[in-house]
Amino acid sequence: MSIEDDVVLLDRVPTIHLLGNAAIRVLAIGSEQQEFARGSVLFRAGDEADCGYVVQRGSFRLVPEGKGHDVTAGPGALIGELALIVPMTRPATATALEYCSVIRITRNLFKRVLESEPDATRRLRDELAGRTSHATSDVVLVGGRLAT
């Protein structure tokens, strides 16, 4: 895929779209593409996470460690969003269900983009704060229902 194709794909990813065109272009240029055969493991639960992946082609099955349901991530999905921001370990194992290609965005690249784009950083911060607030409200609502 060309840089322009990568820019279009990255712009369709909600979290990355928040960054704006200039930042997306830097991510497209600075990231790397990787390919995986069917059955290949992208990462395993417990691995150190230093990047996120945007699926270009194919799909991955993510199987969480311990409790939780399997999830399938296809084209346009961002896998490992939180790893773009903070050091962490992978909570699931991701396995290619078919031939797949991904755009690998390292945390260092993502942080450099945020440092150079203060408006993008604010938009991302506001989005993450909104998600956190919504998740907290959901937990309180479920807790209230369970208490009755």
Image (cartoon, grey):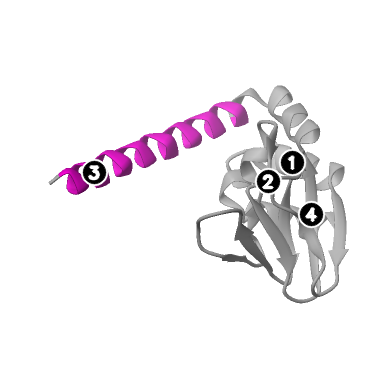
Alpha carbon distance from label 1 to label 4: 15 Å
Alpha carbon distance from label 2 to label 1: 6 Å
Q: Earlier in the sequence, mark 4 or mark 2?
A: 2
Residue 143, by quadrant, is: top left
Residue 103 is tagged as 4
Q: Secondary structure at mark 4?
A: strand
- Crowd class of label 4 (few under 14; some 14 to 19; many from 20; radius 10 Å): many
Q: Which residue bears the numbered disc 2?
A: 90
Alpha carbon distance from label 4 to label 2: 17 Å
Left or right: residue 104 compared with residue 135:
right
**Which percent across, then down, holds residue 21?**
68, 43
Q: Earlier in the sequence, mark 2 or mark 1?
A: 1
**Residues at badges 4 and 2 in contact (C-beta under 8 Å)?**
no
Task: Residue at 86%, 56% (x, y): give it.
Answer: 33
**Residues at badges 2 and 1 in contact (C-beta under 8 Å)?**
yes
Q: Earlier in the sequence, mark 1 or mark 4?
A: 1
The kind of residue tagged 1 is Ala
Q: Which residue bears the numbered disc 3?
A: 141
Q: Which residue bears the numbered disc 1?
A: 49
What span is in magenta?
Answer: 120-147
